[in-house]
Amino acid sequence: MAGNSFGESFKVTTFGESHGEAVGVIIDGVTPGVEIDEAYIQVQMDRRKPGQSSVTSPRKEYDEVHILSGVFEGRTTGTPLFVVLYNKDMRPEAYDDIKLAFRPGHADFTYLHKYGIRDHRGSGRASGRETAGRVAAGAVARKLLERRGVSVTAYTKEIGGIRCARYVEGESERNAVRACDPEAADAMIRKIEALSSAGDSCGGIVECRIGGVPAGLGEPVFDKLDADLAKAMLSIGAVKGIEFGAGFEAARMLGSEHNDAMNSQGFMSNHAGGILGGISTGADIVLRVAVKPTSSISLPQQTIRISGEEHTIRTVGRHDPCICPRIVPVVEAMACLVLEDHLKRQAALHA
Amino acid sequence: MAGNSFGESFKVTTFGESHGEAVGVIIDGVTPGVEIDEAYIQVQMDRRKPGQSSVTSPRKEYDEVHILSGVFEGRTTGTPLFVVLYNKDMRPEAYDDIKLAFRPGHADFTYLHKYGIRDHRGSGRASGRETAGRVAAGAVARKLLERRGVSVTAYTKEIGGIRCARYVEGESERNAVRACDPEAADAMIRKIEALSSAGDSCGGIVECRIGGVPAGLGEPVFDKLDADLAKAMLSIGAVKGIEFGAGFEAARMLGSEHNDAMNSQGFMSNHAGGILGGISTGADIVLRVAVKPTSSISLPQQTIRISGEEHTIRTVGRHDPCICPRIVPVVEAMACLVLEDHLKRQAALHA
Amino acid sequence: MAGNSFGESFKVTTFGESHGEAVGVIIDGVTPGVEIDEAYIQVQMDRRKPGQSSVTSPRKEYDEVHILSGVFEGRTTGTPLFVVLYNKDMRPEAYDDIKLAFRPGHADFTYLHKYGIRDHRGSGRASGRETAGRVAAGAVARKLLERRGVSVTAYTKEIGGIRCARYVEGESERNAVRACDPEAADAMIRKIEALSSAGDSCGGIVECRIGGVPAGLGEPVFDKLDADLAKAMLSIGAVKGIEFGAGFEAARMLGSEHNDAMNSQGFMSNHAGGILGGISTGADIVLRVAVKPTSSISLPQQTIRISGEEHTIRTVGRHDPCICPRIVPVVEAMACLVLEDHLKRQAALHA
Amino acid sequence: MAGNSFGESFKVTTFGESHGEAVGVIIDGVTPGVEIDEAYIQVQMDRRKPGQSSVTSPRKEYDEVHILSGVFEGRTTGTPLFVVLYNKDMRPEAYDDIKLAFRPGHADFTYLHKYGIRDHRGSGRASGRETAGRVAAGAVARKLLERRGVSVTAYTKEIGGIRCARYVEGESERNAVRACDPEAADAMIRKIEALSSAGDSCGGIVECRIGGVPAGLGEPVFDKLDADLAKAMLSIGAVKGIEFGAGFEAARMLGSEHNDAMNSQGFMSNHAGGILGGISTGADIVLRVAVKPTSSISLPQQTIRISGEEHTIRTVGRHDPCICPRIVPVVEAMACLVLEDHLKRQAALHA
């Protein structure tokens, strides 16, 4: 059954394989009359693309944004806004050696079991390239959210065990790992470079902060705001966990510590991460996602062929030794999609 | 907009407030011809109810299962299976004192902002009592899953900082905290009793293990199996985080450590938690959720009244000092709902 | 897969079999803060019930409305509004003779082929009794629509070949067949009584007029307002066709006749039936549905048993010789559901 | 809210305006492993395109099918199958004169009221060109249906009051109006040519016959097979009504006439049109749709400008004087979408 759509009132549907002809997205439910152009979307797209620094894949992706519908004379029309990104740097031959064996940590094995057929070129639909459509859609949502003062900012909190000690405003867009702490960023970069040389990879933690959210967003009981954000984030390939506010630390706190007291100025702390009972409190929404180390490493690994035979594989190719910096804009995009959808749903409820 | 339904091919819709007349669930998409009766559902319902031991709320909930439709002569008919649980131990007067003030850590504040109106009696729709309908639906899903050999087992892994050192098969249903380790269970019980006497509460971690899942379940790209499980779990009131397999630890591992190698017997480890690229691998699905400390504590807390005036509140009532033991069956129920839905979706894809 | 829900932003899910314990509906997405009570819903329910006159089934259905959730202190809370109608006049034994044979024109045959199991008592889920939940939900939608000046009125236009020659305001609620023309009503009643005595039945046409709809409702391209109304109406058991405005007559008109010209006062005619391009024009929405003759007749009919053996059947029981008068409130209810849903969707679009 | 998707288990989402850069469709839920190529889809696309004869618009639409994803080495992969059709014969200047006035019978007025903004070029999203994406998706569904022996055939039954007297197998693809009767076809063509010369247009009736459908498809109670087909057909721009089997005639029949008796060979008639209680009987599904006369006529018509001022308009351009022949493949496409979706849903129910 169909699983390539996300959202209800603001709904996106993506398509495309990494080595097919194009990837892209249909965005349905766009507020009409809002100014938008390809350049605005391109800015977000460029944050996602590989080849930005020594710590990301040197692969080139020509993520040139084309809007083919839904915008007329510079404004959204309310009809489906369609963005396509044609693939160009396709080197299918580079993947021929993995056609017959499963790469550890990859979706090769599961796709074949699900579908009985598999587009093995560069992971096909399971490739990170699929997220390009999401980032395009997220940019449109961000544009709509800006009108209401909602801001969404993600950044690397931790990489390879190195944790940011402080949050410096704007810093994350100034260093190659998108970390919020410049000193930690330096250490992270050195760590990644060393791992990369050794043919290995590492994971990390990305934090996202959503400001300006009015109190009252989120739908009890299943479509809680945190439930929808959790689904959104876990739908990103390399994400293996999510927590809100105090998160897993909350499991070790007492009720008297964890409860956010209130005074006439509002909440006196934010252990809840801006969400209570699945509904926004008006405080910043704070969430963190656990990013696994990139599966594609050049060290030899034990695996099996499709035939069942044991086999040692080395994944060649141009992979990111740590995906955190490139996941940052995807996390933001998914957060934007959830927020815009829930703003629309709240309007419907009160209509 | 409507947020009280969950699932696509196997869809549940719940209704009811804690101190209204009833709670319950409509289950749509039930496979016809399967034997089911109220007694089977009642077993799961009884695991969820309060008053089971010294560490849970002494409140009585008469969760007597009534099937009003969808079953004929002991078998499911394929039409909506409706389960209602009439409320009986309603003491609305006990909640009159909280009518005008927001309880810290509760959804009081957010519900009022969302709806502009609030049923303050025992948290209304935000009450844990809403999960009774989920557990009933989960029991029906479990019945369907049993036919295929899928098993779902959750248990307490950690409470108040005390962590289970070992997993003893069947132990979790033998102790009051549903911990998988008998020695840890004793320590947890003592800790909870002490906190309860002090008017405080604590949180914990619940782990869930799903066995017998065939490889190939889960829908790329948004409706990944882990994304849907994450949404399902975060839709449970007190849950503040989730992780799969190595989870947040994966953020500190190298690719060479985290990747699950394969040999001819299958996966040699399970850091992925049974899911790769959003699709089941055939290995056990393993997830953990972070449960926050119960918000309702009798220690005095600083808050405000609806009027904005500052106020000190003590939440009286019959609350669970730690909700983990009672969340265990809810976690299982939600996992059952997700699994049955995805099995049906996989059948549709290949039809 | 689940097909018992209708609507997106205003969503209803019904349950129940005619001879089970209850029928009812969960209404999700109800605007909070609106006054509603059981008496308001009961008025609509009483229009649907059998036993109102000589031309309807003498069967008694105790459609006593019970709201079990979603209303607090006389106002909607925004949480699921649940209405249950307990069945009381169940005489399953009366249906035992049809357990083993298919009644012509009934869903007996198709339900058995769909599900492989069938609740044969009084048509089970396929019974007209299922519409009780729809009428309850429609009453809630009507209450919400009233606030905006939207009115929904259906009436019998034709029965047994006798067509109303004129429209008399308010007449349809004054005669037993709910016809809009008193003289035609008399003729229809005589015709039905004669057919009833002869053990036969007849069909008719019900017209629905929706006033006060603002221009701009309806979603291109699939969820057009007329497309959703068509689905709503064809989901009513005995309905075999629908047309809007000039309808099937449009097929015989010229473009120069059919196009509704405009002047500064607005549309100069309404051949479009109030909808252009799937979106409301602001003129009255006018639709007509074809209602087939009641399938249950006492004349002998040729059929087969489940075993395949040929058989002659006479459907005994207390059936309506013409269902039009009782379909009128169901048509109104479905129209209300569609309108309220689209009003909410329009609000979401512009949020 | 989003209304550009159709179906649940087999879901299509279309995009595109008539004079934008492209139209197309994402098809989600495609059975993997099925052979399909652009040529197969192109055949259906060519049946829809204008310029096929003297009775259709001389406008050229280069509906060249491009599959950009979801097919690998000639087989479907189960991932979204994306088809794009680039627009080429765009002459926006031809539409500049209608920028400021509403064309009678067109969606100009309603789109502006819905969105507050309008792409006036060639009707924008309301153009018949949007159906190109549907026909592409329908071709994919048809391919899947063929494997099970389901066939879908539509043809013109009546145009401008001229009704086919007989059904000649295969005839409808041999004449320019796609009528099932060669003599009637000749009369229809002469009628259309005369009306076209006079600057006028006419409507008609298209019939669709679906064979090989197994008994048991369709979901009670809202997602009945006829309800979903009705929605599908009314979502086509010019359709103003639909009927199944005896349809509106059923309103004038007696129960003893209308009921389809059964003997050991099956149903002895098919007044039900192949559907009882919303579920397929196994007999042919037969439906007819009323097609209004084309709105675009060159005769002068009274209208208003956006400013409110009265105005006389003549719609210039290259329009179809009767849209029936080109609606035939669209009706088939929509029927294919509904059937494939319900086949998948039935598989999910029994999984």
Image (spheres, coloured by chain):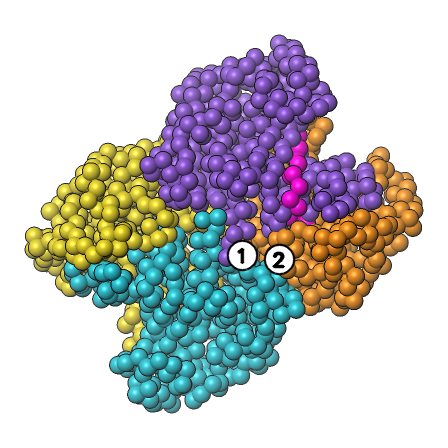
Chain colours: A yellow, B cyan, C orange, D purple
Q: In the picture provided, is C310 more to the left or to the right than B325?
A: right
Q: Are marks 2 and 1 on the same chain?
A: no
The residue at the point 66 percent across, 62 percent down is: C16
Between residues A347 and C137, which one lies in front from this camera angle? C137
Q: Residues within 10 Å of mark 2 (few under 14, many from 20)?
A: some
The residue at the point 63 percent across, 34 percent down is: D209
Total count of labels = 2
Q: Secondary structure at mark 1?
A: helix
Q: Is residue B5 above or below residue B188?
A: above
Q: Is residue D290 in the magenta section?
A: yes
Can the viewer see residue A160?
Answer: yes
- Residue type pointed to by label 2: Gly
- Residue type pointed to by label 1: His
Q: Secondary structure at mark 2?
A: loop
Contact (Cβ within 8 Å) of mark 2 with mark 1: yes
Can the viewer see residue B138?
Answer: no
Q: Which mark is drawn over residue D350?
A: 1
Quarter-wise, where is residue A70 in the image? top left
The residue at the point 66 percent across, 59 percent down is: C118
Disc 2 marks which residue? C116
Specify the segment rendered in magenta.
Answer: D277-296
* Residue C82 position in % (x across, y down): 61, 63
Q: In the picture provided, is D157 more to the left or to the right than D305?
A: right
* Residue D242 position in % (x across, y down): 66, 35
* Residue B235 position in % (x across, y down): 42, 64
